[in-house]
Amino acid sequence: MALSARNILLLTLVADSVDTDRLLLYWSIFYDIFIDKKTVLLLREQCHKLIEAAANIPTWDASVYARFIKFATVETLNKTRGHWLSYAETLVLSDARQKQLKRIVLAKMKEESSSRIGGSMSAMPSAAPLSFRFTLSTKTYDQYWKTGITSPNMTPSSTQLNPTFLFSMAGRQFNLHYGTNPCAAFHLGLTLTKAAYDDSTSSHPGSTVQEVWDAYRQQFSRWSAAFHRPLSSSDQRQSKIIIRFTCGDALAFCDGLQRCMAGDYTPTVYSSMWGGTKFLFHDRTMPISFNAIDTFNLSDHLGLLNVLVATTPLLMVTPYTSVTTSSLLSYKDHPTQRSAIEERVLLDFPTLSILLGIMPICFSSGLTFYNGSEAASLSTALDRKRHHERVSWKFAQFIHARWSGNFTQRSYRAHFEPADLARKLLDVYLKMFEENEGFSSAFECLMTGNLNFTHVQNIHYHQRSFAYFLRLVRSLGFVEASWPQVIRHFINYVVTNSRILLGANHIQNFFSELDILGIYSEDNDLPWHVSKTFVEDFPSCQEWDVVPQIIYIVLKAPRSALRRLETVAVNRSANPILQCEAFWDNCHSFHDSIRPIFGDIIDSDKGRKVIIEDPEGLRGSSPLIVSFFIPMCILADQRHNLQVG
């Protein structure tokens, strides 16, 4: 949410005024890590203005900024306002404290930039065909990370820390990404020609760092003026530009929008992997379907198939609709870029076009997948792990469509034998979870005390991921008539398969996910069996109208049990993998679909247990409450032998 707080701060400043003297201050607020007193005064004034406007949703809607900035949820507004409050509090710290913060931040910047390789090249793609000549990019990056300001000559007045760089999800601490480079936000090709915006032949490459920064500021000023122009129109009630902000997990947000498409605006989807907050969309006018979605490189962090499964249902079914994915990482060597993308999406493109209804346009058009720009070639030469590949995906039904005044969808129907389709689904399942087998070795390291978090940072898929994939495949309708046979064949293949070392240990978790999503129920006679055996031994359950097939188990872990995680540096434990386990007789089951909440469990007035969340989260002292679901039949049959943890 820290990035949104900074972005809204800049956008509102530009909306207020684009006077030349103020634009220089805007630049400093957004890019300089250390700022002068004049900039501090403007930043403090704007923070107080935004804090007052964002007291609640009604006050924000009544503000001048509500015309073009919207908050999708109350949680987003509150968290953004919290950052502005933190900025205002930091700005009034004593001079001695400000100098101390500056020394600390400069030391961390030096340590971070010297320990990383390749950060200075992050702006190279912005230089386009002139990237090989852009040697000044390295100089501007080094100077920025050495001084914290975007001026070759550091002025004594720039002594106060810019608080917009001091807060993030990790709390109040300097946690700037090592690749941060103001150069990357601008068209560096223009900078190399000394920002000649006309067709003059007298342009020549900028030769000094000062000329480069001056060219950046000119572009920043032009962008600000262009953004300000439509906002200053005579009609103050409406704006052609509307930017909506949402705080939450990207995949969960897409799931929430899918529910809104079905008319369900109730808060049922958790907004993040941690905590108990759910998406509560108060704005019923927000768009819930789109003709363009750009996911940048989320696929590197969330898994390409996860991203496509989450976004495809949100697309308008039109010929010009597309979703764009990018990748900054090359996981393995491949003979072609197509093979690399197919490995990441876990499907070959023809099968993908049938099961999900989309395909990359570079496949259908016959164009190359290879990014042949000079910037990409230079980046690859300097760092083989990066290739900056962008792929656009469109609906397969419009590929090669005939044009007769209007686009005409291709008329086709896919036919599968149930067993054949089940085997194709099994191939995806195996690819999805064979990739995660590395977790087994990491688990062994954990048990022996040789914990290495690099082993467990890149696991993208779990049982719920595949359940969502199945739900999307089924929703396309071509397989609905034979779905019961397909899913039975598939379940049989999964249960009898031995290629995944710990596959059997996830079966109960997988069955639970399928049952919750309505994809598959393990036994039609199960409800009667559970009701009879469970109610006999647990009289309190006689008040239940229906004994569910899936039940949640809630665990309370004392804070002392988390010390191993708390002692690890923040940048190494950003994505700790947690899961619950169940033991009974000679059986063992993993459950990775968990809900961790820092807080405590109390008794409510109605005789129920209620989880009270600690707003301090990991930084607080409350125990960790973890809930996970398990088939009721296990609890009913093994109620005396079951152990969980």
Image (cartoon, rainbow, N blue to C red):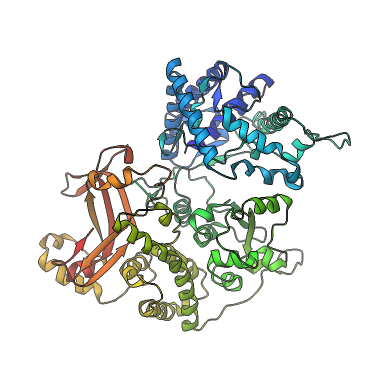
Percent x, y of residue 312: 54, 60
Which residue occupies the foreground of this view, 402 or 374? 374
Q: What residue is drawn where x is 15% and y is 71%?
A: 533
- 251 lies above or below 27: below
- In this rendering, the answer to whether 422 lies above or below 559 is below
- Considering the image in quadrants, where does the C terminus appear? bottom left
Tell me, yes or no, if residue 161 can be seen here: yes
Residue 609 point in image, percent of width and height? 19, 49
Q: Residue at x 16, y 44 (%)?
A: 605
Q: In which quarter of the image is residue 198?
A: top right
Between 77 and 430, which is closer to the camera in this rendering? 430
Q: Give the image quarter of residue 183.
A: top right
Which sits in the foreground, 235 or 214? 214
Q: Position of residue 606 (x, y in %)?
A: 17, 47
Q: In this view, does 191 lie to the left or right of 638?
A: right
Residue 408 appears in view = no
- Kindly indicate the quadrant of the structure image that contains residue 74: top left
On screen, 135 above or below 368? above
The total number of labels drawn is 0
Question: Which residue in the rendered view is the most extreme toward the right?
Answer: 201
- Position of 318 with respect to 80 (left or right) is right
How far from the left and from the top, in percent, is residue 142? 61, 34
- Judge left or right: residue 625 versus residue 255: left
Residue drawn at point x = 48 percent, y = 70 percent: 431
